[in-house]
Each structure stands twice: as C-alpha cells, then as structure tokens.
Amino acid sequence: MARRSALLLAAALVVVCGYVAAHVRLIHPSTKNPLYWQSAGAVGVVIQSDGSEDIADGSHTTALRQAIQSWNQVPGSVARLVENTNPAQQARTDWQADDIHLLIFDEDNSSGYFPFGSGIVAITPLWFYSSGRISDADILFNGLGFQFTTSAQPGRFDVQDVGTHELGHLLGLDHTGWSGATMFPYVDTTVILHRSPSADDILGLRSAYPAASFATISGRVERADGSAIRGAQVVAMDQAGRARAGILTNTSGNFVLTGLEADTYTLYAVALDGPVTAGNLTGGQTVDIDFQPTWYPDTVTVAAGGSAAAGTLVALPDATINLGRPTDRLPLRATIGQETLTSLRGTSLAAGSTLTASDPEVTVAVQNWLGSAVIFRVTVPAGVEPGHVDLMVENSSGERSVLTAALELAPPNPTVGSVTPDVAGAGGGTQLTIVGTGFRPGARVVLGPRIYTDGEPGGCTVVDANHIQLTVGATTPGVHDLVVVDTTGVEGRLAAAYTAADLPSLGSVFPSVGSASGGTQVRIAGSDLAPTAIVRIDGVVQTETTWESSESMLVVTAPGSAGGPYLLEVENPGGYVASTQFAYVANADPELFAVEPSVGPATGGSVLTLMGSGFAPTTEVVFGADPVTGLGGTPATSVVYVDSSTLAVVSPPGASGPAAILLREPSTGQAVIEPAGFVYKSKGSGGGGGCHIRATGADSAGDSGGGSGSDGALWIGALLVLSLGIAARARRQLAARPATA
C-alpha cells in the first residue's frame, strides 16, 4: 500500500495567510496528484456534540448543518456530505482516528495545532495516499485562541462562515484568488458572505466530482518573449460582467477551464500578487507575478458540453499599481437597491486614477484617493441578480490592477417581524406563519435544532416576499430565536421569537361527567403531558393524579358542585395549559366490582353477572370499548337490571382476547370501565365461562365435556335470562301491592 501523507489547511484570517489557489484542487506535495474522495457521493462527517464553549445553546450544530447543506446543494456535482447523527459518534473526540471525520472545537489546544498566539481560526488536517485518495479529514476550530458565534455577536467568528470554508478543504478544494469566494483564505468577524459558495467554488466542486458533461475552454498565457507564465489566474466573465470561472495556468502556461455552462465569455489573466500570493498555494506550486491584468481581445463562445480554444494571450508588463490587501474585509458587500460607502487598500492609489466595476449596472464613485487606500461609494440598482463583480483600478499611465470578485452584490437582510403562533408544543406539528420582508426563494428558516429549507420535504414555503409558512417539527423546549437565512448567506433574526413549550394537548377526558361527591376515576389522554402536570377542575386542584406517560394521566376527582360543564385544565411546568370540559352530577357514580364468569366464547352468548353499585334500569353495558376514551365497542346483547348492585348481561360476539366492559348511565353521562373485564376465547381454546353441561342421553364415555360447546352455552344463557326476567317482574308486582297491617 502506498505510504500515507498529511496536509494541514488553515482558514487564514486577517492576521495569517493560508494556502490559496483558484478553484484548482488540493494536490499531493510530491506526486502532484489532485486529492479526492473515492466515494465522493457519501463523505461521512460527524459534528462533535460538545461544540464551542462560547455557544451555550448547541446552535453550532445547526450552523454547521447549514454549511454542509451549502455544499450539498451545489449543482452539477456528485459530491455529498453525509452527517452521522449517532449520539455515540457525536460524543467522540478522537478526531485522529481514520474511521471518523469530526467537526470539533479544540478549546485547550489538545490537538497541538493552536499554540498560544496562533492566528489560525480553524484547520483541516487531511491524510491521503500518493494517488491523491483521501483517507481521513477532520475540521478543528481554534476555541483556545478565538471566540465563535451563531448569532452575530460582535468580535466573534461566524461558525457557518468558517465551517463552509473548511468543508471545502475537506472535500479536496484549495483556496481561491477570488475575494468573494467561500474558499478565499481570509476571514473577518464582520463578514458572513463566505457561507454561500460562489460561482468559482461551484465550478471547483463540479470539476472535481462532475455529475454531467460541461463545457471547457483551453488556452495559454505567455510573455512577449514567448516564455510561459506559470500560476496566472485566468478568469472567465459572462457578458453581464459577472465572474463565472477561474483556474491557474500550469508550469507550461496552459490552462483548461472546466465545468462551464454554454455561454459567451470574456477571458483575462491576472497575477496572484495580493491579497493572495504564491505563499498561499499548496503543493509547492510556482506563481509568476511579473505582469499586469491582460484581456483576450476576442470573446469565446462555447456550446453545452463542448470545448473551445481561446488561443494564446500575451500578457502586458508588470505595473506598480495594486488593489486589495489581506486586511480588507473581503468580499465588500454592495447591497442591491442601495448605495454603500466602502474602501480598499493597495499601492499607488493616487488621484487621477479611475475605479470601475465589471458589471456596467453597478456605479462606483470615488470619494478620496489616499495613495495606500481608496474610499468610494457603490450604487447597485434594485432588481439586479446577486453575484460577484470585479473592481478594476487604472492609473493615468494606463496601468491596471484587478481584484477579482471584490464586490458581492447581496440583497438587503431579510427581516422577521412576527411569528404566529409564537408558542406551541415542543413535539411539533403546529403550522407557523412568519411575517417579515425580503424573503426570497430558497430561503432557510432556522428554529431551534432544525433547518427548514424552502421547497424541500419537511422544509418551509416562501409564499411571497413577506410570508413564510412551515410546520414546525419537534423542537428543544425553551425560547428560541427565529432566523431567516437568504441563499446568499445574509440573514434576519427575531430574538426570542418562539417558545417550544412542554405544551400539553388534550385528546379526550373519560368520563366527562362525575359525581359531585368526588372519587370519579377520570382518564386524561393527550400528548406532552408532563410528569408534574397539575390538573384543575373548576379551579380546584385535583390532588389524586397518577402520571402514566406523556399521553395518559389518571385522576380521582375531588368533590365538586353539581353542575357545569366546568373547565378542566392540565398545566405543565412553565404555565402552559390545555383545557377541556367536565361536569358534576349529584348521583353517585356506577361502580363495577366483579364479573362472573369473566371468560366466554368469542361467538358471544355468555350470561354474565355484573356486581357493583349505582346501577340503574337504564344503565348501558358495552364490550370492547377503548379503555382510555370509552369510545367504540359493541353493546351487550341483553341487559337485565336486577337491582342497583346487580346486572345480568349476555355478551355480544367479540375478538379473541381481553375486552373492556363499560357501564354508562346515558341520562347523566357517568361511566365506569374495567379495561380487561372479560376475556373472549375462540372455539377449541378451553371452557366457556366455567359451565359444564352434559347433553341428555349421552354417556360419560362418548360425551365427555360436550356441553361446553357453543350450543350448550346459548341454551343455558337463554334459560337464565328468562328466569331472571320473571323474577324481576315478580319483584315489581310485589312492590305495587298495597301495604297490609
């Protein structure tokens, strides 16, 4: 097996340079083979659960998931990052192991990569073979030296912004010379625009892992004497003046731009002489900088999936003027529909020079030339598409400097005005309506641990620029910000907008009527019922409650006043209440003490004696009702009222197994249920309630137990009902006679 090598890729910040190139791949320092994942369609990653000490709510996970999603949504590439959410894997810290690719915050420099004073905010160690195949890659955030945020706290680095950049390295991409690209090596606490891959990043990923056949443009860059210019950045620009693709020339001065859409392009070559320089490249690549930006004289048109030759470009001699420094907050954001005052550093930025944008719709007005800086205003008309625009400075001698993708045209930040409802159960399922401004197709809503993406299953729907709808999923209980993130990465946030409550929900209360004397057994069914939930009826706290599960509670009622219906409330901790109705009547509740026999055939016909109290001639008996709600079931075939403590009942047919017996008084609504009061047995499974009758004329040898079949049980049942009926009539007649002395 080939020997494995290691490569460290730093997300260089304002104070440190990282490794940088255009959308070229990371390359093996010795073999010069590009680095790649063999199974690019499923590159597993794990977000370490501890997160950052700066972020108490665990939102680092959501931020990094958005970074993962940004790369997974790149069109035209088979590369996909797959998050492993197994809690055991998320708890691991052994990022050095080959079997896990961790995204982890190093808070104490246990990795050894972040010594005191290090300017590296995050680093991606990669291990790979001589062929370029990556065997392991992990992302480490420097939690010792820097602070991180997911909520735009000043002076802290945005987790999603840094994470998206580092994931590009994990996928095998190098840095870029494009100031507005995700893979640009410098980051600032005030910049979040690296969250969304630029055209250069997109072409980089689809060139490394293409999902289709794209167009290519080839050519060469050389000096006037015919010598090759190595490491020149060649940029393809569309006819609207937007940068679309970039690549570096090889040691022979040749280049091949890949991953292109069919279009007509203008090409130019520019030196990596700042803010990106030769020291930023991986693999010991050579970069020549002794020339100034030079344009191909003719445009190049390429068809879908086709190829075109741009020919040879002879670069102009070097110039003294230069635009852009690592300390600039790049990309410069230019808000669509607004005017923005901004500045850039450089050299020889003197009066008499001009500063222009590559997109003619974008207006640049210089305020001051300061030699080492220029202050200017950028005006972007409303309605233009987001994207990246070059800035070019030209002095009075005609010398030029171009800063590729220096401006990022971004929409105004979306705003979130309200969320309705703003409180709902933590279990999810509630439809939310978000009202605000600047909502655009493809937006994401971040709420608690979840990301809802416009148009995706389980996501959200951008109804229009002012409304978003979504059905909220299970959310960590507590108060949450609601964030709407545009596809460009800009966001709007409403702090403490939504409360995911342990909000109880009531499905049924059975029975819904009880005795004013108290003692009624009431079963409450619903969802998100807390173990410490309080139950009140007409404002009176019910002290005898038994929590069975988040979906069920049993309450033995306290005495109340006959009447109603009254409010029955279930209150979870935090004051979240669900309510329904309950009534009291003066009558005592029916009670069921015993059922004899308690077993009978599934064909029905068993004669049962129900013993208890509070029975009435109108009492109904139902077999197989739901023991929680009292709904459903089959009425008894016959019910004979013997007295207030005895009923004679004939069972209806039922399914084999235990069945609840429900007694209900229809005039009041009072009820009692025995969850497994009777057991149905199928034919051949054993006796029929304990009765054993021998058929007349059968001998003991030939008819052993024959009377336990269904015919015998039905005959006995009919006889018993008849006799009980006669006895009941006799008692009624006796009671009607006049009393005698």
Image (cartoon, rainbow, N blue to C red):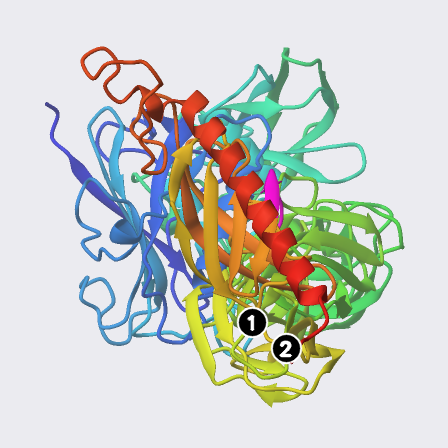
Q: Is-magenta flag for residue 168?
A: no
Q: Position of residue 350 (x, y in %)?
A: 70, 67
Q: Which mark is residue 580?
A: none
Q: Which mark is residue 151?
A: 1
Q: Position of residue 150 (x, y in %)?
A: 52, 68
Q: Which amino acid type corresponds to the residue marked 2 in the rendered image?
A: Glu
Which type of secondary structure does the marked residue at label 1 adopt? loop
Which type of secondary structure does the marked residue at label 2 adopt? strand
Quarter of the N terminus within the rendering: top left
**Cβ atoms at labels 2 and 1 below 8 Å apart:** no
Image label count? 2
Magenta stretch, overall SS: loop
Viewer can see residue 243: yes
Q: Nearer the viewer, residue 185 or 519?
A: 519
Disc 2 crowd rating (10 Å Cα; few below 14, some 14-19, many 20+) is many
* Quadrant assignment, res 6: top left
Q: Nearer the viewer, residue 418 or 240?
A: 418
Q: Is-magenta flag for residue 632?
A: yes
For the residues labelled 2 and 1, the Cα–Cα distance comes to: 38 Å
Which segment is the magenta one?
Answer: 630-639
Mark sitting earlier along the chain (2/1): 1
Q: Which amino acid type corresponds to the residue marked 1 in the rendered image?
A: Ser
Residue at horizontal 63 percent and vertical 12 percent from the top? 305
Eyeballing the image, is 720 above or below 452? above
Eyeballing the image, is 593 above or below 576? above
* Quadrant assignment, res 282: top left
* Residue matched to label 2: 569
User: Is 247 on the left or on the right of 734, as rendered?
Assistant: left
Q: Nearer the viewer, residue 224 or 646?
A: 646
Residue at horizontal 68 percent and vertical 28 percent from the top? 296
Viewer can see residue 271: no
